[in-house]
Amino acid sequence: MTKNKWIADRCGIPAQEPQQPAQPQADYPDLIDLTIGDPDLPTPPEILEPAFADARAGHTKYTNPIGDLELRQEIRNYYKRFYDLDIGLNEVMVTSAGCIGMTETMMAVVNPGDEVIVPDPYFMIYPDQIRLAGGAPVPLPTYGEEGFALNPQRLESLITPKTKALLLNTPNNPTGAVYTKENLEQIAQVCIRHDLLAICDDIYTGFVFGGAQFTPMITIPGMRERTVCVNSFSKNFVMTGMRVGNLVAPPDIIRAAAGLNDYMMYSAPAVSQRAAIYALRQAENITPHIAAEFGRRLEYAADRLNRLPGVSVHKPQGSIYLFPDIRGTGLDSAQAVQWLLENAHVKALPGHIFGSCGQGFLRLSCTQSIPVLEQAFDRAEAAIKRAGR
């Protein structure tokens, strides 16, 4: 069909209508969906109940566009408690979740033609967020054989006079990798040497396992003045539907992002901001319990994956995902996803949608209980036996 003349090019709508995707739930009523990055656990009542009380007391209006002052102070307190960083109020801005925070950051710092380096595999919307700001995403290959760590020499080889920033996500979606402090120090030296900004998607900070440790890039010497931290309450506090997050960044970047926010969102939802206050105040009690449940699921799923012929996965380090290598099966990512769907009624995401380095991998989200995961792997094993694979 002819492209609608009213639609802007930035929307990326194709000239031809794509084929309608299959509706697996309709075809497979017993479908087990391991694609969703939305934790299945309920938001803790110690977050909800005081927020509801605040709503009844009148916290249902616009807040200050850069955020409820009480929440911004709690974000400062959190950074002091967890990272021993003294953050100024002028370095904090509340956003309507992490996605809008990342988009506003890109629009605040990226000029047309600027390049932003993104480790591949990556969260699939990063390239479009960069393009929306007029920039060009530049993939930085990372490999399963290297634990998806960042290679500083490989990074440096991609830098050009147009390079503006490096986008980092640790713990990583989709790979689950957690970059070590030593690895981040190497990358920091590259950023300092080439005067690059580090834009950090710090959404899974509470989900670290097996001895791994989350190190914020902002804490690395020399990086405080060149780091933007994009934070969200969605995963650490199971608040995905409440749409609230924050930016921690140098004051000039906060001012630029706030100017954009004035005509994009104006303010994050007031009730969600109140919930975020209570989440941060109780973070030490809330997040570890949530993370522990996901740690058990990841360990269970990793053990089952490593028993499947032609499949291997690293010991879980972080996030709520596993990224198994299925190249030993002889199938590519799309073929493996289709085979699982048709033969086991289990839905996964193909690795190649997260970048070229994801080809030969699948992303499995452990947002189902262990009994449901057990059923999924039992089905997969039974299907493999039936097929004689």
Image (spheres, rainbow, N blue to C red):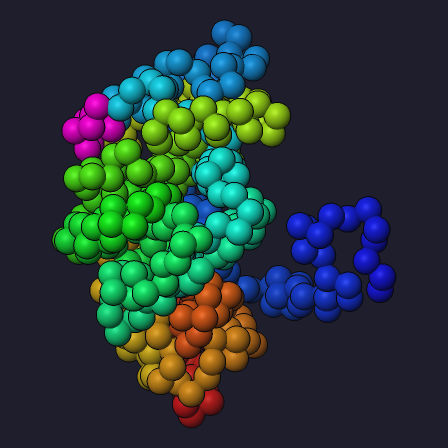
| Quadrant assignment, res 202 | top left
Q: Tell me: residue 24, above or below residue 50.
A: below
Q: Give the range drawn in magenta.
A: 79-86
Front residue (pair 108, 46):
108
Q: Tell me: residue 78, above or below residue 227.
A: above
Taking the image as shown, residue 64 lies to the left or right of residue 366, namely: right
Q: Report x, y in % for residue 292.
A: 25, 46
| Quadrant assignment, res 24 | bottom right
In this view of the protein, can residue 15 be seen by the observer? yes
Q: Report x, y in % for residue 303.
A: 26, 69
Q: Report x, y in % for residue 127.
A: 51, 55
Q: Tell me: residue 36, above or below residue 42.
A: below
Taking the image as shown, residue 157 lies to the left or right of residue 65, namely: left
Front residue (pair 293, 161):
161
Q: Residue at x 15, y 53 (%)?
A: 182
Q: Which residue is drawn at 41% across and 30% down?
A: 253
Magenta segment: does it hold 81? yes
Taking the image as shown, residue 65 lies to the left or right of residue 186, namely: right
Q: Which residue is drawn at 34% across and 29% down?
A: 250
* Dominant SS type (magenta): helix
In this view of the protein, can residue 174 be seen by the observer? no
Quadrant where the N terminus sits is bottom right
Magenta segment: does it hold 38? no
Q: Which residue is drawn at 20% across and 28% down?
A: 85
| In the image, farthest residue toward the front | 161
So how many labels did they put on this image? 0
Taking the image as shown, residue 259 lies to the left or right of residue 193, namely: right
